């Protein structure tokens, strides 16, 4: 299906000031290259002049294609829309704020085009805001997922099938490397310079930190227990139920105990039963997901 060698996917939310220079730099970076490029800018419900600017730039640059979301749907959804519109088997996730320069895109895709890697991620070189938060986020991610890269949430290039295997979940683009590595794809890392934002303001706020932590735990659970949820809920439920039974028998035999102890035993029995039932329901959901994946594979194989 490939009609170009590389598709650069650029989510853009209120980036009208940055897009003209970004596209000019893309044209400079792609000029004279052996591989062919297209740039797909996904206007993620912008309320500024982004749509008008894209119309003007599309007439100027033949490699540019625009996709528009009527409302803001987030980076993960924007990347999904770009992936569906892309005509290449090699995709690049690139931000619109010009903190990274398009001249680094050929370096990102080179190992993939050479067949040396399935995914290449950048490692930020230079000072940047929220570096402390980024270090904590990346440190926790390496601790949980044992991924041998220093920067998970950065510019990256990857084969089309990597994106095809990603779950469609909000904000999970941050864990694309983790999910790809868990599925057996090879991942390499290269340094990329980081520059001050050209115009506009960052869409990231500290309010995103708790969401990021919860997403991290959700991804960990997905990789650890999604195929066998009864391992998590069933073992926990059985353990709590057993504790309640043992303590109940001890109190019955000794004839001692206070009301608080009996309440604790009842709570253990109740929660143990709930957790175990949740594990059984989770097994049914996992079976349905497995059937869905198999149907998807058969459709893709046709």
Image (cartoon, rainbow, N blue to C red):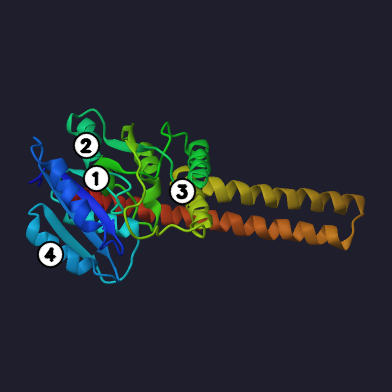
Q: Nearer the viewer, mark 3 or mark 1?
A: 3
Query: How far across and down, in percent of the image, does residue 251 sit?
Result: 86, 52
| Residue depicted at x 17% and y 56% | 85
Q: Nearer the viewer, mark 2 or mark 3?
A: 3
Circles 2 and 3: CB atoms closer than 8 Å: no
The residue shown at (51%, 57%) is 206
Q: Which residue is mark 4?
A: 56
Contact check, label 1 and label 2, Cβ < 8 Å: yes
Query: Which of the numbered marks, if any, corresponds to residue 109?
Result: 2
Q: CA distance from mark 2 to mark 3?
A: 27 Å
- Pick whichever of labels 2 and 3 is earlier in the sequence: 2
- Estimate the spatial distance between the alpha carbons at disc 2 and disc 4, rounded to whole Å: 28 Å
The mark that comes first in sequence, 4 or 1, is: 4
Residue tagged 1: 92
**Could you tell me how far apart the alpha carbons at marks 3 and 4 are, in whole angstroms?**
32 Å
Which is nearer the N-term, disc 2 or disc 4?
A: 4
Q: Position of residue 186 (x, y in %)?
A: 31, 32
Assign a secondary structure to mark 1: strand
């Amino acid at each position: 299906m490939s009609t170009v060698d590389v598709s650069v996917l650029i989510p853009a939310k209120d980036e009208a000031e940055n897009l003209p220079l970004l596209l000019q730099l893309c044209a400079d970076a792609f000029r004279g290259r052996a591989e062919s490029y297209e740039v797909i800018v996904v206007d993620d419900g912008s309320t500024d002049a982004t749509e008008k600017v894209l119309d003007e730039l599309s007439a100027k640059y033949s490699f540019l294609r625009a996709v528009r979301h009527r409302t803001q749907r987030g980076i993960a959804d924007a990347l999904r829309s770009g992936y569906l519109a892309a005509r290449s088997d090699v995709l690049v996730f690139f931000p619109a704020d010009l903190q990274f320069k398009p001249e680094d895109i050929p370096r990102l895709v080179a190992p993939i085009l050479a067949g040396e890697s399935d995914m290449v991620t950048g490692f930020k070189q230079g000072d940047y805001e929220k570096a402390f938060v980024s270090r904590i986020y990346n440190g926790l991610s390496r601790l949980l997922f044992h991924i041998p890269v220093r920067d998970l949430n950065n510019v990256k290039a990857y084969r089309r099938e990597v994106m095809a295997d990603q779950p469609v979940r909000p904000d999970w683009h941050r864990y694309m490397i983790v999910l790809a590595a868990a599925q057996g794809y090879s991942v390499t890392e290269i340094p990329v310079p980081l520059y001050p934002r050209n115009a506009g303001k960052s869409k990231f706020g500290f309010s995103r930190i708790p969401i990021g932590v919860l997403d991290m735990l959700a991804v960990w659970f997905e990789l650890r227990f999604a195929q066998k949820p009864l391992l998590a809920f069933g073992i926990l439920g059985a353990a709590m139920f057993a504790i309640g039974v043992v303590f109940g028998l001890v109190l019955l035999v000794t004839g001692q105990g206070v009301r608080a102890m009996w309440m604790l035993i009842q709570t253990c029995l109740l929660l143990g039963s709930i957790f175990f039932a949740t594990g059984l329901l989770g097994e049914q959901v996992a079976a349905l997901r497995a059937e869905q994946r198999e149907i998807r594979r058969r459709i893709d194989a046709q």
